[in-house]
Image (spheres, grey):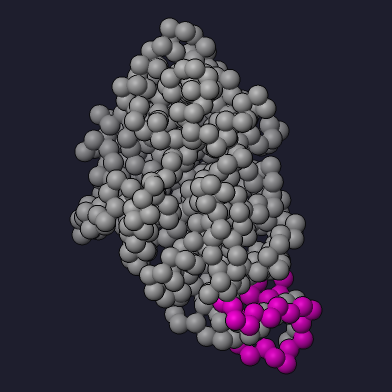
Amino acid sequence: MSFDLVIENGLVIDGTGAAGKYASVGVTGTKITAIGDLSVTDTKRKIDASGHVVSPGFIDTHAHSDGALLNDGQHAEGVRQGITTEIVGPDGLTYAPLPREQYLMYRQYLSGLLGLPPEDLDMSSISSALDNYHHKTAPNVAMFLGHGPIRLGAVGMEDVPLRGEVLKRATRTMEESFEQGACGFATGLSYYPNSFSDSEELVQLCKVAARYDKAFSIHTRNHNTDRAYFGGGVEEALEIGRRSGVKVHIEHYRTSASNAGQVDQIMEPIERAKSDGVDVTLELYPYPVGSGHPLSHFPSWFHEGGTEVALRRLADSETKAMLIRELESRDSEILHNYSWTWIASDANRHYEGMSFGDVAAERGTSIEQMICEVMLEERFSCGLRGVPPQSARLWRAVEEDVMSLLDRPDYMVGSDAIPVGGLQHPRAWGTFPRILGRLRRRHGYPVEQVVQRLTQNPARRFGLAERGEIREGFKADICIFDPEMINDLSSFEDPMMHPIGIPHVLVNGQSVVENSECTGIMSGEGIRAV
């Protein structure tokens, strides 16, 4: 028997949670074709994995790399973590399915989160969007159907509920998108136009997802809470699951600096919903603060009409004064704990890495006014991140909670990576090796269990066929790592640092990382979920 590649002498951890075993893995073309003693076989190439684990490649359930991958398909910050599949479109913030005019509007609107990909792309359907990535990126790309594009296609950037004919139009688009391979339906109810919805709209849309056996991935609501069951939050998400029958997947659900140590409390509504028959999974990342874009702090009325209308509001002195007052009354304390991660213009780029307070002082104005001015100057092409707690003990408490939650079989890992800007959040560069390395070793969790959360769990939840396991006939998406060496090096001070201990990564049988360096091979596929 002959192979294109044999990986020998490694501890094969297959992604199922079963104990690892020493074996060779044979790869032919894009697939794993044999596992066992392959010492007498013929092969074009060998990798000696002595002292290393051979595992399925990792699947990131929450990647805001939609735009970054279109600008740089190598995606070193992802594949060098062992990520072989990125699921883009979480929070319902993505580009497809949108006709050209709406794509260009939403591209600019989301640029603080997703960067600025090329203008001349076909995003009119899930199928055409996946084609933009197919064999043009190092990792595979799977795609959520986003609530944002669904609403834009039905009613534009307007504050109206989806009912009647516009709801029928939205459901037809959903059906077409699931048939073309969307891996789930996602919304983020801190963002627009998603937050113009009410709970009843989401129930009706989720009934479509349920018919196609697709999961509903949700960033829970904190905007327009008067429109939501139970005032939003996780209770709204679970009630949508009860009423629609959809499988619920709750994004970045973990403790943070404000509630560290309260794992039992945050899981109580989850357990209650499960006892009612709701199918719930969850995800997390291992940091106490997050990142995003400033638009999520602006009131609902600001977003109506789309990008150019909103920019005109910022340019109008009277409207800007009203916005500043709202920011001061709503989110002032939160805004004082941010720094800029990305600024598009050369004139303001030195703000990257500066706290909002320092930038405001440099400009001689308040933080709230500074945000409005910078957003106008950058046409929304600016991103932010939280300031981490100073207490090492608080950091450790959050990390203890992260590993406690990952001990549950219903959890997986989503980095929430925003790989845009000069001083990014370290989660874009270190989430997976941080969990599999320092946190697993510190807390004594079995490597087989942690690998399962990163591989088989998401593959099964989101319909990624022939992925997530080392199994004959499955795609050869493989990560080879040193279980004692693997570690993240990215930090809030120096986030854009690659991890150590991951010498080889294969995507569809091709080496995208070899000897800890990217090869430039673009073997990733646009995955049509089943």
Which of the 4 quarters of the picture holds residue 347? top right
**Residue 52 is covered by the magenta coloring:** yes
Q: Residue at x 64, y 46 (%)?
A: 69
| Image coordinates for residue 503, horizontal then vertical, percent | 65, 69
| Image coordinates for residue 401, horizontal then vertical, percent | 32, 59
Seen from the viewer's position, the closer of residues 155 and 255 is: 255
Seen from the viewer's position, the closer of residues 197 and 404 is: 404
How many numbered badges does the structure rendering display? Answer: 0
**Residue 37 is covered by the magenta coloring:** yes
- Whether residue 309 sits left or right of residue 248 in the image: it is right
* Above or below, 194 relative to 2: above
The N terminus - image quarter: bottom right
Furthest residue in direction top, as rendered: 318
- Whether residue 262 sits left or right of residue 291 in the image: it is left
Q: Is residue 178 visible?
A: no
Q: Residue at x 59, y 61 (%)?
A: 499
Q: Residue at x 43, y 19 (%)?
A: 366
Range of residues picked out in magenta: 25-53
- Whether residue 382 sits left or right of residue 514 in the image: it is left
Which of the 4 quarters of the picture holds residue 49? bottom right
| Image coordinates for residue 107, horizontal then vertical, percent | 59, 31
Q: Residue at x 73, y 89 (%)?
A: 41
